[in-house]
Structures are given as structure tokens and as C-alpha cells.
């Protein structure tokens, strides 16, 4: 699937025995770390965050219910990151680079014929760049046309 970055939210920490148990968090972290290592990820690049979605612990603000949790750290060649909450981990995700140097690939989702405007193909640019004025060919029909305009959803 091309997933390069992971965050593990250890949820329901309020339901552990005893509630907010550091031992239970460490047990889950160890088990999940060994699994993600088996499938090819480096656990040092994964943020593990103990949370309680029901109570909001460590979601947006550091929780007072888990004083033992000092925060998460991830190591990566683009620069290390650290934080205390799930939102911090989400904010630390690096956006993937778009393959703009590759040839244009735009799988069509639909085609609309709009009076006064013309034929409007709808899809998502997966690779390459699409600009007004470009001449493009649609396969397999081998129809060549000029791009008059490009719009993003509701923009």
C-alpha cells in the first residue's frame, strides 16, 4: 500500500487493570513492536501513544492520568520528532512527495458533458503534472485534446 509512516495509538487505557496501567501499555507496545518489525517496519520510527478516546487522555493534551508516560520519540533520516499526544504524532507525519517527474497518469472517475462548457473528464492526478494548454491523449480510446482548464474539488 505504500504506507511508510506509522503511529500506534494504544487505546482504552482507562479500561486496563488497574486503569491507566504502565505495565499493560509496555506489554502491548512490546507485542506490537515485534509484529511491525516482522512486517518490515523499524519500531524506532513508530510513535507509540497511550490514549483513552473515551476520556480524551493524550489525544490533544497530555494526560494527568498517565504521569509515567514521558512522551514518544521517532528517529528518521529526515529529522527526529517527539511529542506527548496523538495530535503531536499526527502533526509530525511527513507529507509524502508527489511523483511529479513521472509521466502523467490520470485515471478517470467520470466524464460529464456540460452544455456551454463541453466535455469534463473527472479523475485524480496520480503521477506527473496537468496544466492548461497541455495536449493529452486518453487511452485506450486514443483521443487527443488540449486541456482548457484544471479545477480541484470545489476550488
Image (spheres, grey):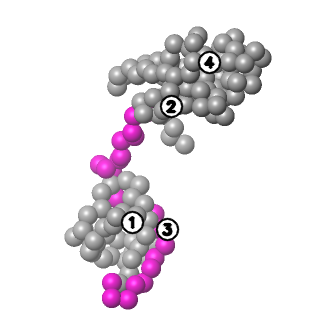
Among all residues in the image, which is located at the extreme right? 17
Spatial separation of the CA atoms under disc 1 and disc 2: 30 Å
Please tell me the numbered disc located at residue 60.
2
> x%, y% of residue 105?
39, 59
Camera sees residue 42: no
* Circle nearer the viewer, 4 or 3: 4
Which comes before the other along the chain, label 4 or label 2?
Answer: 2
Neighbours of disc 2 within 10 Å: few (<14), some (14-19), many (20+): few
Q: How many marks?
A: 4
For this view, does 73 lie left or right of residue 17?
left
Q: Mark 1 or mark 3: which comes first in sequence?
A: 3
Quarter of the picture containing the N terminus is top right
**What label sits on residue 154 in the rendered view?**
1
Q: Read off the magenta span.
A: 93-117
Q: CA distance from mark 4 to mark 2?
A: 14 Å
Examine the image and state in which quarter residue 135 appears: bottom left
The crowding category of the residue bearing disc 3, from other C-alpha atoms within 10 Å (few below 14, some 14 to 19, many at least 20), is few
Please, what is the dominant secondary structure of the magenta stretch? loop
Kindly identify which residue carries mark 3: 109
User: Crowdedness of circle 1 by 10 Å Cα count: few (<14), some, many (20+)?
Assistant: few
Kind of element beneath mark 1: loop
Image depth: mark 1 or mark 2 in front: 2
Q: Depth check: give the residue in front, 65 or 118.
A: 65
Please say whether residue 141 is one of the residues in the magenta stretch: no
Q: Residue at x 32, y 76 (%)?
A: 144
Distance between the alpha carbons at the discs numbered 2 and 3: 37 Å
Q: Earlier in the sequence, mark 4 or mark 1?
A: 4
Residue bearing the label numbered 4: 65
Secondary structure beneath label 4: loop
Amino acid at each position: 500500500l505504500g504506507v511508510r509512516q506509522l503511529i500506534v495509538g494504544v487505546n482504552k487505557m482507562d479500561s486496563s487493570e488497574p486503569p491507566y496501567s504502565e505495565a499493560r501499555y509496555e506489554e502491548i507496545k512490546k507485542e506490537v513492536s515485534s509484529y511491525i518489525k516482522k512486517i518490515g517496519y523499524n519500531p524506532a520510527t513508530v510513535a507509540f501513544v497511550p490514549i483513552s478516546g473515551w476520556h480524551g487522555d493524550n489525544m490533544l493534551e497530555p494526560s494527568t492520568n498517565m504521569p509515567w508516560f514521558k512522551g514518544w520519540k521517532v528517529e528518521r533520516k529526515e529529522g527526529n520528532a517527539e511529542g506527548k499526544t496523538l495530535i503531536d504524532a499526527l502533526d509530525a507525519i511527513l507529507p509524502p512527495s508527489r511523483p511529479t517527474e513521472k509521466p502523467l497518469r490520470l485515471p478517470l472517475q467520470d466524464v460529464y458533458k456540460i452544455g456551454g462548457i463541453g466535455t469534463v473528464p473527472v479523475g485524480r492526478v496520480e503521477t506527473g503534472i496537468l496544466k492548461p494548454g497541455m495536449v493529452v491523449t486518453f487511452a485506450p480510446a486514443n483521443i487527443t485534446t488540449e486541456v482548457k482548464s484544471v479545477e480541484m474539488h470545489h476550488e
